[in-house]
Image (cartoon, coloured by chain):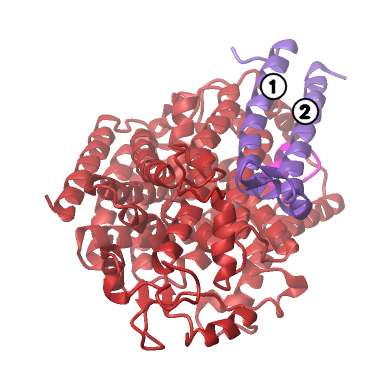
């Protein structure tokens, strides 16, 4: 396996991990499980409703920055950074 | 000073800023014109992307949609933000590494085919034009309302302004104007929300106010109170789900994929200096978008509460529980003039009854002597614009909201027009039909293409082929089913070849168009639809708005199937794919 391929495999793993979280918070907590989660409250918010209209968006932002940061680390690790 | 004079000053001032910026950042080369010379800082690029992305629909319509849909509106909120996660991880960094000017150029090179490039141009123009119609209409409405002129005059003013700064400035001018427009629109959106949230709950942060206790001494939470108000008047509870889970799921998915496939959003990530900047820039774009998108649910819920409380002043059913029509506030009168708010005294008691269609409640309502819901029309789109008036905020805030709405519509229209003109001049003329034109002639051609695009969009804005919402849904469905899958396969697969890509794009866009036309009429012409657009008639219960998700899946399946049956991808293309996967050696953008 070349250096480039090893880098690509790590990237794919990271991406799939992030997309699983992406799916769970939005489609999982916000849509499929919204009923049961609404029995729990977060301040004045039913939890499922909070995920659907607030929480999932905060998680999306964190995910992108987490991905971008980790990728910058990989770029350095595999010596594939741009000049 | 009157409201009209204040509006003129605020809107005029913001225009002066936009045009000054456009002239100062005038494009001198094709690289400046198409991708702003690739020198835009990622945070600023994120801000410009946010303005580009948030259209009149986000600014004006979304909170109103939330106010009346309640929970179900989460499909729009998550759909229009979740797409950025896909963009950051699946497309933006690789397309930046590829280092060209347009989306069809990538498709043409990766699938080593002029035909694929032209099909991509066709998909791009179809979805950008449909999207821009909605914006032109929004510009017309905003100008005509606040400058108090005819709709067509308003539209022509808007076209003129877009023409000046988009045609002169190109991407460089547009990027810097969009940064200014973002500041105007986000300020205009959050200031009233902060005021109103503070009035109602004592919490100045709208995102927290929505989950806070009301400050009226009742000890109830805002959402709890809103649920009670809704249910007491025969509406569905605000936080309850009304659509089927299947449709919420599909619509969210469709909007996410569509967002990641919209060409005017994708080209924004060609403007940053490095691959790593493209990743971070997507994150910043989502930060700036989320500021508005997390405020919108608060605006929607508070507007709904205020509206219901204004009309239902006492206990439901008591003789003096409803507002006397003669006592209605001035904003009510103002919006009645526009025909977007209509009241009819069905039981002739001079009081306003506003209630839902729930059957059980209908019996109760009869016993109160109510003869039907008297608020015949409450247009969703007035919520954001009326909100500052409902909360009695000063004139300058109301004027600011007008300027914000106009900024949102103008910035999106400019971005779309640039995507259209660059694909015509660069992908069609320069690469296929007039290969020998020099940079200066190409620049001229793209400016002419943009001027033509503005005229076409303006004409379509005057004669829209359907409701703005229908047209926008079509744009998302088209982007989701045609552009996103083919870009993703181009990066993540070395097996998909030109025949597969072309077949996939045509299947995706064709099936989506067909499904939408079956329920909305051929080319949106009323009365030509073979099926009524109701839930019982939908194939497998799929709403035409959400069909883009299915179209995208068909695109993937067909592309892989056709590729496996036809020739393998040439060696040099496989190397190209390997090369775009790593950031090293990106360098500056080249057009050729």
Indicate the quadrant where residue B320 lies: bottom left
Q: Residue at x 71, y 68 (%)?
A: B542
> Tag 2, which secondary structure?
helix
Residue B179 percent location from the top left of the image: 38, 34
Tell me if B108 is positioned left or right of B421 in this view: right
* Chain letter of the residue beneath label 2 in the structure image: A
Where in the figure is residue A65, as x and y percent of width and height? 63, 26
Q: Residue at x 69, y 48 (%)?
A: B486
Q: Which chain is red?
A: B
Image position of A28 (left or right of B452)? right
Residue at 64 percent of width and 81 percent of height: B360
Front-lying residue, A68 or B431: A68
How many dots with numbers? 2
- Left or right side of B288 for B585: right
Q: Which residue has dot 1 on it?
A: A71
Residue highlighted by disc 2? A14
Q: Is residue B492 magenta?
A: yes
* Left or right side of B342 for A20: right
Residue situated furthest left in the rendering? B1
SS label for mark 1: helix
Indicate the chain on which mark 1 is placed.
A
Q: Earlier in the sequence, mark 2 or mark 1?
A: 2
Res B192 quadrant in image: top left
Compare residues B5 and B165 and report the one nearer the observer: B5
Mark 2 and mark 1 in contact? Answer it, CB < 8 Å. Answer: yes
Pointers 2 and 1 within a single chain:
yes
| Residue range of the region highlighted in magenta in the rendering | B485-498
């Amino acid at each position: 396996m070349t250096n480039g391929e090893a880098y690509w495999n790590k990237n794919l793993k990271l991406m799939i991990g992030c997309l699983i979280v992406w799916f769970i918070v939005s489609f999982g907590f916000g849509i499929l499980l919204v009923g049961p989660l609404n029995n729990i409250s977060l301040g004045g918010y039913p939890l499922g409703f909070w995920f659907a209209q607030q929480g999932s968006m905060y998680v999306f932002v964190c995910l992108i920055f987490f991905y971008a940061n980790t990728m910058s680390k990989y770029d350095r690790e595999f010596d594939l950074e741009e000049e | 000073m009157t409201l009209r004079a204040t509006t003129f000053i605020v809107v005029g001032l913001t225009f002066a800023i936009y045009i000054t910026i456009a002239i100062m950042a005038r494009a001198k080369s094709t690289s400046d014109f198409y991708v702003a010379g690739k020198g835009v800082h990622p945070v600023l690029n994120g801000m410009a992307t946010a303005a580009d992305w948030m259209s009149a629909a986000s600014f004006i319509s979304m909170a109103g949609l939330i106010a009346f849909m309640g929970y179900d509106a989460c499909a729009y909120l998550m759909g229009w933000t979740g797409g950025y996660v896909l963009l950051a991880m699946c497309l933006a960094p690789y397309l930046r590494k590829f280092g060209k000017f347009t989306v069809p150029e990538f498709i043409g090179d990766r699938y080593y085919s002029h035909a694929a490039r032209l099909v991509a141009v066709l998909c791009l123009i179809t979805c950008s034009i449909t999207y821009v119609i909605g914006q032109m209409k929004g510009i017309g409405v905003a100008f005509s309302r606040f400058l108090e002129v005819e709709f067509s005059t308003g539209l022509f003013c808007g076209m003129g302004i877009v023409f000046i700064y988009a045609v002169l400035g190109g991407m460089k001018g547009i990027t810097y104007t969009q940064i200014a427009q973002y500041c105007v629109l986000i300020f205009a959106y959050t200031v009233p929300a902060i005021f109103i949230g503070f009035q109602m709950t004592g919490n100045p942060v709208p995102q927290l106010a929505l989950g806070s206790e009301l400050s009226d001494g009742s000890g109830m939470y805002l959402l709890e109170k809103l649920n009670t108000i809704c249910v007491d008047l025969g509406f569905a509870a605000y936080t309850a789900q009304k659509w089927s889970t299947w449709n919420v799921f599909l619509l969210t998915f469709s909007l996410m994929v569509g967002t990641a496939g919209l060409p005017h959003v994708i080209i924004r990530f060609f403007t940053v200096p490095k691959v790593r900047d493209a990743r971070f820039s997507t994150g910043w774009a989502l930060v700036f978008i989320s500021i508005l998108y997390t405020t919108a649910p608060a605006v929607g819920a508070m507007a709904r509460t205020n509206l219901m409380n204004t009309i239902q002043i006492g206990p439901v059913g008591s003789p003096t529980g409803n507002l006397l029509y003669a006592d209605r506030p001035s904003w009510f009168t103002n919006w009645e003039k526009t025909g977007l708010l209509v009241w009819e005294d069905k039981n002739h008691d001079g009081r306003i009854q506003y209630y839902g269609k729930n059957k059980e409640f209908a019996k109760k309502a009869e016993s109160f002597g109510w003869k039907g819901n008297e608020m015949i029309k409450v247009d969703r789109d007035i919520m954001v614009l009326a909100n500052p008036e409902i909360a009695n905020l000063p004139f300058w805030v109301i004027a600011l909201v007008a300027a914000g709405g106009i900024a949102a519509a103008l910035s999106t229209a400019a971005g779309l027009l640039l995507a259209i003109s660059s694909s015509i001049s660069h992908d069609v003329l320069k690469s296929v039909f007039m290969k020998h034109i020099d940079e200066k002639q190409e620049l001229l051609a793209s400016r002419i293409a943009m001027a033509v695009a503005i005229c076409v969009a303006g004409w379509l804005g005057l004669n829209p082929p359907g409701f703005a919402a229908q047209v926008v849904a079509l744009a998302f469905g088209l982007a989701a089913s045609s552009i996103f899958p083919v870009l993703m396969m181009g990066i993540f697969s070395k097996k998909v070849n030109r025949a597969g890509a072309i077949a996939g794009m045509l299947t995706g866009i064709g099936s989506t168009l067909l499904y939408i036309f079956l329920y909305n009429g051929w080319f949106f012409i009323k009365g030509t639809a073979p099926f009524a657009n109701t839930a019982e008639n939908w194939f497998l219960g799929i709403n035409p708005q959400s069909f883009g998700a299915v179209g995208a899946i068909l695109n993937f399946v067909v592309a892989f199937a056709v590729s496996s049956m036809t020739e393998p991808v040439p060696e040099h293309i496989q190397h190209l794919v390997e090369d775009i996967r790593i950031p090293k050696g990106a360098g500056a953008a080249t057009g050729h």
